[in-house]
Amino acid sequence: MGKSPLRNVLKNFLEHYETLEESVHHSRKVIKEFAESGRSTPPPLSLYAQEFLKLKELTESLKNDVNCPMIEGHSEVNRKKNRYKDILPFV
């Protein structure tokens, strides 16, 4: 069982991207309908928003995971390398 050929990986990515884009268009349509109808219930999140929330939850869970320490990222030698507050260098 080897790695998927690049063609399959790219095809899968493009299919996923198209699904996400369709969800954005659908979400915009639903938001517009909600605004026009005066409903107070918030519309469902797009798939992009759902994926972003999953990534945020994963980041938070990793920060609290004892099996995934981020001590090296907080050391003085690595402090200047930390361009993102949620991504720390791994040693």
Image (cartoon, grey):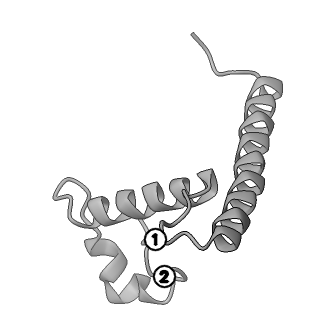
In the rendered image, residue 52, in percent from the top left (x then y), is placed at 53, 61
Instruction: Identify which amino acid the numbered label 1 is placed on.
Output: Ile
Element type where label 2 sits in the image: loop
Asked which quadrant contains residue 39, the reply is: bottom right
**How would you rate the neighbour count of disc 1 (Cα within 10 Å): few for under 14, some for 14-19, many for 20 or more?**
few
Specify the quadrant that holds the N terminus.
Answer: top right
The circle on residue 87 is: 1
Nearer to the camera, 51 or 26: 26
> On the picture, is 70 further left or further right than 22?
left
- State the residue at coordinates (65%, 68%): 37
Instruction: Identify which amino acid the numbered label 2 is placed on.
Output: Asn
Vertically, is 25 above or below 13? below
Query: Which residue sits furthest top?
Result: 1
Query: In the rendered picture of this protein, how many numbered marks are placed on residues?
Result: 2
Specify the quadrant that holds the C terminus.
Answer: bottom left
Q: Residue tagged by mark 2? A: 82
Vertically, is 57 above or below 76? above
- State the residue at coordinates (78%, 55%): 25
Nearer to the camera, 76 or 59: 59
User: Of marks 1 and 2, which one's residue comes earlier in the chain?
Assistant: 2
In the rendered image, residue 88, in percent from the top left (x then y), is placed at 42, 72
Query: Which residue sits furthest left?
Result: 66
- State the residue at coordinates (42%, 87%): 79
The circle on residue 65 is: none
For the residues bearing labels 1 and 2, Cβ distance under 8 angstroms: yes
**How would you rate the neighbour count of disc 2 (Cα within 10 Å): few for under 14, some for 14-19, many for 20 or more?**
few
